[in-house]
Amino acid sequence: MAENQTSTTELTSQYIAQVTNDLERNTKEQDRIAGDISTLKEQLLALQHDHTVLVQMQEALGGPRPAADTTPAAPSVPNQASAPTKQTGQAKPKKAAATGVKKTADKKTPAKKPAAKAPKSAAQPSLVDLIRGHLEKQSEPRSAAEITTVLSEAHPDRNIKTTVVRTTLENLVARSSAHRNKQGSSVFYTATTEPAAAPQAAAKTD
């Protein structure tokens, strides 16, 4: 009887040691995966923030507006205890779902009606063209704030900001498409076509 009890005790100790080791490995693996998910979520949030900023800049510069918000939603972190079970149980359904999505995409590929709306956005004049055209119509210098007010009233559907208008005007000045005139602490802009006409008129008079 003593030998049987000793064998049972040793077997129980072996099982306990094995289970303890398995638990340690399982815990370490969960910690590693959770750390990877946390890092990926931070990267995704950074990309979403950059996406939002780029879309706002595109709209401010008069670029085509996106048809819809394509920013992906941040995934939720699954429970660590149930993560291994879910991965094993959903392996086959994911494959089937992917096949179904591919078949649906193949069927809808020939019809691309939404693309027909693109020319409407592309047909809109850019902010650069609007500012240059406005300056060419003016007989007196105009400030960035004045130009912003006029263009905002003429195009209420566009989000035109003074800072973007001022940057665009400075780019036109750098390309010799506009002149900068500073009066005190204020800066005014004129189109280059008007100053260019003056020397020609003076030459004819001489």
Image (cartoon, rainbow, N blue to C red):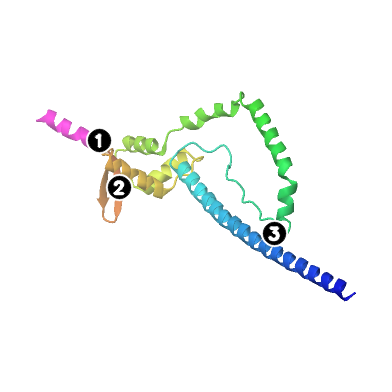
Whether residue 197 is in magenta: the answer is: yes
**Which residue position holds label 2?**
188
Q: Disc 3 marks which residue?
A: 80
Position above or below: 82 against 173: below
List x then y, in percent, for residue 201: 17, 31
Q: Amino acid at mark 3?
A: Gln
Task: Check disc 3 and report its element: helix, strand or loop.
Answer: loop
- Residue sitting at 41 percent across and 45 percent down? 148
- The residue at the point 57 percent across, 37 percent down is 67
Residue position marked by numbered label 1 in the rendering: 194
Depth check: give the residue in front, 171 or 103.
103
Q: Quadrant of residue 177?
A: top left
Query: Could you tell me how far apart the alpha carbons at marks 1 and 2 are, in whole angstroms?
Result: 14 Å
N-terminal-most mark, 1 or 2? 2
Q: How many angstroms separate mark 3 from mark 2 (CA)?
A: 62 Å
| Quarter occupied by the N terminus | bottom right
| Residue type, mark 1 in image | Glu
